[in-house]
Image (cartoon, helix red, strand yellow):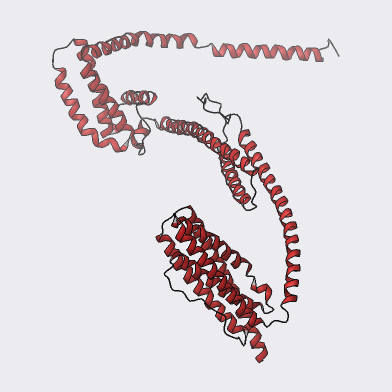
Amino acid sequence: MNGVLGGFKNMLRQWRINLKRKKQKKAKNITKYPKFTSFIYSTIAIIYSPFGYIFARYNEQAKQEKPNIYKQLEDINLELDKIIVDENQKSKLKKINQKIELIKKDIKQPMTDNTKIYFNNKIKELETKVNFIKNPNTISSKEVTIIRDSVKNNFKNKKINVPQNINKKLISKLSLMPLIIKKENFDKQEKILKDKKSGDVEYIKKTTKEIKIIEDNIIDIEQKISIVKEYNHYYDLENNLKYLRAQITKLTNKYDELKINFNINLNIDFDKYKLVKSKEKLENMLEKIDNDLFLIERKKKEMITKKIKKEEKEEIKKQEKQKQTTKKIKEVDEFIQAKEHVLNNIINQNKYLNSYLKQLAKSTNKKKTLFSSLTNFSKTVLNFTISLLPISIFKNKLLGTLVSTIMINNSIKTMRKMVNPKLQINYETFLESYTNNKNIISNTYYFCNNSLYELSLLKDELLLLGANKDAKELLTQITTIENNIFKQMEELKLKDSTLDKIYVKIKK
């Protein structure tokens, strides 16, 4: 079919010819009226260009010749443009009219004709704007164009901002609503970018300072971890690390929330930890804290293991000692034994008191001797409140508790006697035979209360002697003794409640 009319090559050739004709026709249509249009625009430009040049020259001449009047007219023009845009500015119109009238009088003073022509034309323009504000329908389309160009120019030079209460009636008449909406959106975007920039920089400044403080705290805690010997001390270090981790997590969350991406050029010489690039520093600190917490947990386990082994050995020794003691006193009457314990305790305390008074008489620093002796004696009392030795001796544990309570009560009275040798005290002795456990609990509770009362009097007497290092240590031990007595009283309540239930079952 090649070479034949209607063949593929002929069809392709014809298609190219048609395409070329279309392009030529289109080019012809485009250039059909350019000369005529250019002629019209050129003519208009030639006619108006002298007037534009002359007006610009008059403007410059007026500005140099009468700068005060020129500035007043420019200010009034800007104020009128603001009134056109802002509904709330309309109240200023009366004052503006007064200003225009005063300028009319000033123009009557001697000046060149060109300057006077410029000022008169400018006043007419201002009066046109005033009329437009009062009644938008009274001015021509040409005057509308002049006013619109003036408002646009002031918007462009940022002399007018978008108001809250837009004068929609006048703006619609000038067809400026799209411009205002565009300007409003632009201002919002600009404010958002400005706020973001400020927020990012402020975040980096604040975070850099906080990281330095947190880092110093972590170093301090790590040094303490290696030297801790008491199990309970690990809790403080652990809590401090958890608090620091919470602070870093908060900074990290804020970082993610801001989604910092510094594509703009900022002065960030203070960014010591390169937060502009990433939050790697924060992540590394979190990892470091987690490692420290793991180390503390491991050391705690090691310490517990050692403590358990030690307690097991002590418990074995204690049990063996209890068995031997039980064998020796098995045949002895418990009440007689109780009396002996209390009387022996009173005798020993009197010996200690006499020894102390002799030492005090010889001492040159009586206050130091007093606190030293009291501290040593209170340690014995404190250990006694913890161990409550007679409980392990008596088969009847409640009876043993009562004996211990009486002995503690007498010891506290001895301490008061040491503070005030003139004080008359009555030691409690074990003279009563008890018929039931309920009476034992009642008396034990009474002596516990009396001991707390004696301790409160002792603290008051010590406070009168003044505070020093020994006094603080002594008061701490006394507070511990009080706490131990409170615990004993709580246990007595539980036992009392249990006994009541037993008695109820027996009656039934």
Residue 471 coordinates in the image, percent (x, y):
47, 57
Q: Nearer the viewer, residue 265 or 380?
A: 380
Quadrant where the C terminus sits is: bottom right
Residue 472 coordinates in the image, percent (x, y):
48, 56
Q: Nearer the viewer, residue 277 or 319?
A: 319
Quadrant where the N terminus sits is: top right
Q: Is residue 127 above or below residue 421?
A: above
Residue 241 placement: quadrant: top right
Q: Residue at x 56, y 81 (%)?
A: 442
In the displayed structure, does residue 204 sit left or right of residue 331? left
Residue 360 coordinates in the image, percent (x, y):
46, 60
Residue 280 coordinates in the image, percent (x, y):
63, 33
Q: Nearer the viewer, residue 266 or 162?
A: 266
Q: Is residue 331 above or below residue 177?
A: below
In the displayed structure, does residue 426 sit left or right of residue 157? right
Q: Nearer the viewer, residue 381 or 364?
A: 364
Q: Residue at x 50, y 24 (%)?
A: 267
Q: Residue at x 35, y 39 (%)?
A: 165
Res 84 seen here: yes
- Point out the residue furthest to the bottom here: 507
